[in-house]
């Protein structure tokens, strides 16, 4: 039922709109985040590969020097020191060369004769030692390559400056570490032996296939977001755009599906608004004198909907005018074939609202309605509730003037509950007063209300207006009203509102 749908909370609708708008943004951001992580992982992998390649090349260079010098081990330092220095000069990455005999470094390119014990355990896999400087250059990284054969040995060293340079240049946006055994070197050129630091984003380790070292690459915390904000601004704008579009679509779709006005538009096109007829009888002989047409909504899911649940929305949206037009056409189609059998003008009451009085459309609708009947066979009575009196503007006065000329009667509905003045009743040339059912219900129950009822009856007589009493349910009420010369009676006592076919068959019985 649309009126239930309408009750869907505003906060829920706002939440659905927000979720629909945020969903593409959040999903898109998650996908972009995954994409950025992949790109960073790939970049870290490539950087590590390149670093390993460069370190291999440098170590090849250093190892070649050692290979050339190894056969010279055992000869006197005097005989070989030139050969040692030649390697340092010829090879770009070699900083110093040394010869070893029986684990004793006895000749160095730097000092010539020298004495220092070599401990093979210092070298990872007996070959590489990443050290934090030597007596000549303390606190300067140094990578020593060791080659040995029996008692012969050669040590060539690679300057840490070249290593940290590679770490800095290749890994411009990447954090790069070179690990040899328990020691590691970062781009700042310092050798450390603490546990290797964690690289939080895209951590990648690559071990050389030729030498005993490993390169670790990765990015600092928050790099994924930094990467996204620098690489994906156009995609972010697109996501925002899609988010806003999705939010708008959801908002309008909800409004369409939840708006009672939209639902009523649909119902009007589907001819779901149908007339029910409630008989109105003569006060004296109780014969059927006419009927009030009451609208019902035959809702496909909710069944028969009462008018007070949807009429306010229909009025608010202005749909009440086409809805009433449809009701009048259906009524004419149903009653016109019967009009030949009417012995006196049959009263047909149609409820109208202030929305009907804003222009002159109603005149055409009434003309069309009356044209369907044999002349003089019908009295069209427009019922205007007293609770919603209309302003006497030029257009309304013109409207009522034209309706009057057409022979249309005017009834003030729910009389006694509003504030219509005598002037008002005259200005709109009112023909009937419909006494509100609340006064009828008080007959024999509440003396004050009965008093008001008597005053209304008195007033109608004085103003020469015809009276209709609504909501007559008991014999006592009926008798009281008849005794007070109320012209017409309407209520469950004589008949409840009923569908057209039922009304037509009941009509022939009366
Ligand atoms: P209303 O014009 O005062 O119509 C009389 C209402 O009283 C009807 O309710 C009718 O079913 C009910 N009624 C009749 N006799 C008795 C009775 O003996 N006892 C009781 N308790 N009730 C009785 P309904 O059909 O539910 O309509 C309610 C209101 O909806 C109407 O009050 C009228 O203001 C509005 N309405 C109905 N159809 C239309 C329409 O086509 N256009 C407009 N603008 N309003 C309509
Ligand atoms: Ca009415
Ligand atoms: Ca009424």
Image: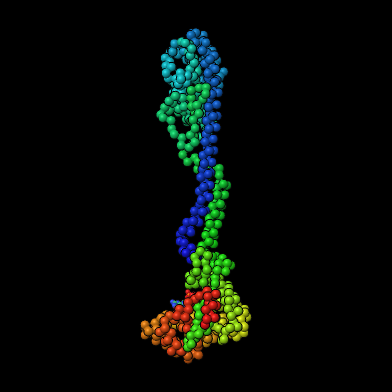
Q: Residue at x 44, y 82 (%)?
A: 416
Give the residue displayed 54% in from the left and 16% down from the top: 65
Asked if one can make out residue 282 in the rendered structure from this viewpoint, the answer is: yes
Task: Note whether residue 382 is visible.
Answer: no
Which percent across, then down, holds residue 272?
A: 55, 68
Residue 106 percent coordinates (x, y): 45, 12
Front residue (pair 178, 477): 477
Q: Which residue appears at 55% of the width and 57% of the height?
A: 249
Figure colour scheme: rainbow
Estimate the x, y position of residue 37 in percent, counting from the top left. 51, 39
430 or 287: nearer the eye?
Answer: 287
Q: How many marks?
A: 0
Indicate whether 327 appears above or below 231. below
Q: Is residue 309 above or below residue 53?
A: below
- Name the residue nearer the viewer: 129 or 377: 377
Q: Is residue 337 left or right of residue 152?
A: right
Q: Position of residue 354 (x, y in %)?
A: 53, 77
- In the rendered image, the residue lying farthest to the bottom is 462
Taking the spot 51% from the left edge, 62% from the top edge, the residue there is 258
**With respect to residue 395, does 224 lie above or below?**
above
């Amino acid at each position: 039922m649309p009126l239930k749908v309408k009750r869907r909370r505003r906060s829920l609708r706002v939440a659905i709109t927000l979720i629909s708008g945020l969903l593409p943004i959040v999903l898109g951001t998650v996908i972009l985040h995954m994409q950025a992580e992949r790109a960073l992982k790939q970049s870290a992998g490539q950087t590590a590969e390149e670093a390993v390649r460069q370190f291999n090349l440098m170590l090849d260079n250093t190892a070649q020097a050692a290979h050339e010098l190894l056969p010279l081990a055992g000869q006197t330092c005097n005989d070989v020191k030139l050969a040692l220095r030649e390697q340092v000069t010829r090879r770009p990455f070699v900083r110093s060369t040394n010869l070893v005999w029986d684990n004793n470094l006895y000749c160095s390119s730097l000092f010539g004769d020298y004495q220092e014990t070599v401990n093979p355990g210092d070298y990872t896999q007996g070959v590489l030692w990443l050290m934090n400087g030597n007596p000549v250059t303390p606190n300067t990284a140094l990578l020593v390559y060791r080659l040995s054969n029996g008692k012969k040995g050669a040590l060539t060293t690679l300057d840490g400056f070249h290593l940290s340079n590679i770490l800095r240049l290749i890994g411009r946006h990447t954090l790069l570490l070179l690990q040899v055994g328990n020691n590691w070197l970062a781009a700042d050129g310092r050798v450390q032996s603490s546990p290797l630091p964690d690289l939080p984003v895209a951590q990648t380790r690559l071990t050389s296939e030729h030498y005993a070292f490993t390169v670790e690459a990765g990015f600092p915390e928050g790099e994924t977001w930094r990467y996204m904000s620098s690489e994906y601004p156009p995609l972010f704008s697109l996501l925002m755009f899609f988010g806003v579009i999705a939010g708008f679509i959801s908002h309008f779709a909800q409004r369409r599906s939840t708006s009672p006005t939209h639902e009523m538009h649909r119902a009007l096109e589907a001819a779901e608004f149908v007339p029910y007829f409630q008989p109105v009888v003569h006060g004296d002989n109780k014969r059927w004198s006419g009927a009030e047409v009451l609208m019902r909504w035959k809702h496909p899911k909710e069944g028969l909907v009462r008018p007070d649940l949807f009429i306010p929305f229909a009025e608010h949206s202005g749909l009440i005018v086409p809805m009433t037009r449809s009701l009048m056409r259906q009524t004419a189609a149903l009653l016109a074939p019967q009009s030949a059998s009417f012995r006196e003008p049959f009263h047909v009451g149609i409820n109208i609202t202030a929305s009907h009085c804003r222009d002159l459309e109603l005149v055409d609708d009434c003309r069309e309605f009356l044209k369907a009947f044999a002349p003089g066979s019908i009295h069209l009575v427009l019922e205007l509730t007293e609770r919603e009196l209309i302003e006497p503007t030029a257009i309304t006065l013109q409207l009522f003037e034209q309706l009057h000329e057409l022979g249309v009667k005017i009834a003030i509905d729910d009389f006694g509950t509003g504030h219509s003045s005598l002037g008002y009743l005259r200005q709109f040339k009112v023909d009937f007063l419909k006494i509100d059912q609340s006064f009828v219900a008080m007959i024999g129950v509440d003396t004050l209300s009965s008093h008001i009822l008597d005053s209304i009856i008195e007033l109608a007589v004085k103003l020469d207006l015809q009276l209709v009493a609504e909501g007559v349910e008991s014999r006592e009420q009926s008798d009281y009203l008849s005794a007070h010369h109320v012209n017409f009676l309407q209520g469950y006592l004589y008949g409840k509102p009923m569908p057209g076919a039922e009304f037509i068959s009941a009509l022939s019985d009366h």
